[in-house]
Amino acid sequence: MKKIVFLLVLVLLFTGCSLNNINDADINSIIDNAIEEKNIDERLIFSGYKLRIPQGYKIVGKNGNNYKMMSNTDNYYLYVDIISRYHKKEIIHEFDRNSYFAKEISYKDITGFIEIKEVENKYYIVAEYNYAKMETVIDKDNLKTSVRDIIKILSSVEYNDLIINSLIGENALNYKEEEFNLFESKKEENYFMDYVEEYDTYKDDTPVDEDIIN
C-alpha cells in the first residue's frame, strides 16, 4: 500500500513539474527542447510526406497541402510546402522590430524562423521551418504551449523525395503555384485573418493510417 501511495505521489510530482516547467521556461528554451524532443505523437501519412500531431490536436479540414487543425477551441493553419522542398529553397524572412518575440531557427542544416506579435490582447504566431509553415492567433495563457506544439509539428514532417519528385518533376513551375503563395510572409497580422476568411474552405480528405502503411 505504501508503495502505491509513493508511486502516486511521484506521478503527481513529475506531472506538476512538467506543467510548471513550460509556464516558467523562456520561449527560446521551449523551442530548442521541442526540436530535440523525441516525438511520440500520432503519425499521419500523406502524399510525399508524413507528420505527427500532438495529443489533443485533430485535423478538421484539408485542402491540398493546407490543413486546418484544432486543439480545444484554438485553430491552427498548416501549409506543407513541397515546392520549396523540391527546390531546397532557402527561407528568407524580415522580422518586425516591434515583434513580441522573433527568432531564427537552425538545427541539423534545417533552417527557419518563428515570430510572435501582439494583436488586440492576443498573440499571432507564425513559424516556418522544415519546408512547412504554421500560423495561429492565441490567448496569452496558451502562448508557450502553442509555441511548443507548433515547433513539434513542423519538426516532425518527414519528406519522401522520390514521391515529391514524381509528383512535381518537369511540371515544377506549374504545380499548384497558387497554393504555394497562400502562406506568403505577411507584414501585417490582419492579412492572416483575411486569409482565413478567403481560404478557410477545406475538403474532408482522410489521412492514411500509419498502421496501414509502414
Image: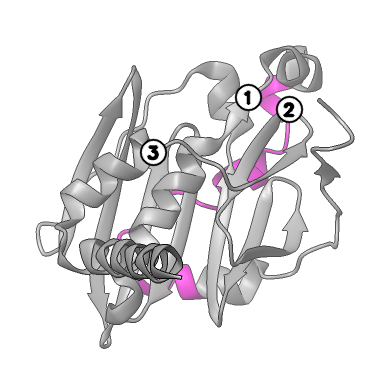
Which of the two discs, 3 and 2, labels the residue nearer the N terminus? 3
Q: Can you identify the residue that label 3 sits on?
A: 37
Q: Can you identify the residue that label 2 sits on?
A: 48
Q: Residue type at mark 2?
A: Gly
Identify the image quadrant of residue 121: bottom left
Disc 2, SS: loop
Q: Are marks 2 and 1 in contact (CB under 8 Å)?
A: yes
Mark 3 surroundings: few (<14), some (14-19) or many (≥20) residues within 10 A: few
Visible residue check, residue 95: no
Residue 159 badge = 1
Residue 182 x %, y %: 57, 52
Residue furthest to the front: 1
Visible residue check, residue 36: yes
Identify the image quadrant of residue 209: top right
Disc 3, SS: loop
Residue 21 x %, y %: 22, 61
Number of numbered labels in the structure image: 3
Cα distance, mark 1 to mark 3?
A: 19 Å
Query: On the rendered structure, is 117 left or right of 53?
Result: left
Q: Residue type at mark 3?
A: Glu
Instruction: State yes or no: residue 123 in magenta.
Output: no
| Identity of the residue drawn at 37% across and 50% down | 127
Residue 76 x %, y %: 53, 65
